[in-house]
């Protein structure tokens, strides 16, 4: 069972390297955004597998923190792609 989990971790690391290629050489900005979001999900999966290997629940806090930061980053990048700015200022004054 532990060998299977280590093989899964190695496969996850290989997929992260493929996604890093997409982040740096992506044909468009939305492709890069999807790759960054996928890296966040794979990182969460890898930490969950490490939590199973080490038989601890400590990593659940780390998983939640990475999930929240990944979500906020995805929303901010999406808004920047759509409107060109993240924080809108009221300029009617």
Image (cartoon, rainbow, N blue to C red):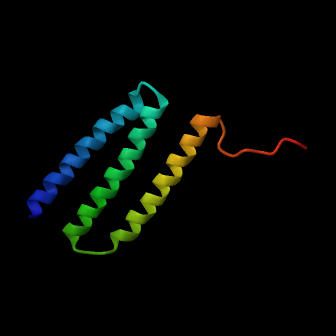
Residue 21, x across and y down, in percent:
34, 32
| Residue 86 position (above or below residue 29) | below
Closest to the observer: 14 or 91?
91
Quadrant hosting residue 83:
top right
Total count of labels:
0
Residue at 40% x, 28% y is 26
Q: Nearer the viewer, residue 79 or 66?
A: 79
Residue 26 in the figure: left or right of residue 80: left
Give left or right: position of 21 versus 29.
Answer: left
Q: Residue at x 66, y 39 (%)?
A: 85
Q: Residue at x 22, y 68 (%)?
A: 52
Using residue 75 as the reference point, say whether residue 35 is left or right of it. Answer: left
Residue 11, given in percent of the width and then of the height, sits at: 19, 47
Q: Residue furthest right?
A: 93
Quadrant of the frame with the N terminus: bottom left
In the rendered image of this protein, does residue 5 appear above or below residue 54? Answer: above
Q: Is residue 76 left or right of residue 52?
A: right
Q: Residue at x 39, y 50 (%)?
A: 40
The one nearer the camera, 85 or 18, is 85
Quadrant of the rendered structure where residue 79 is? top right
Q: Quadrant of the C terminus?
A: top right
């Amino acid at each position: 069972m532990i060998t299977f989990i280590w093989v899964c971790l190695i496969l996850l690391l290989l997929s992260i390297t493929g996604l890093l290629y997409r982040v740096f050489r992506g044909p468009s900005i939305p492709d890069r955004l999807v790759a960054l979001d996928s890296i966040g999900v794979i990182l969460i999966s890898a930490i969950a597998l490490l939590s199973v290997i080490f038989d601890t629940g400590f990593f659940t806090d780390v998983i939640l923190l990475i999930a929240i930061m990944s979500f906020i980053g995805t929303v901010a990048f999406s808004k920047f792609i759509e409107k060109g700015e993240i924080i809108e200022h009221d300029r009617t004054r």
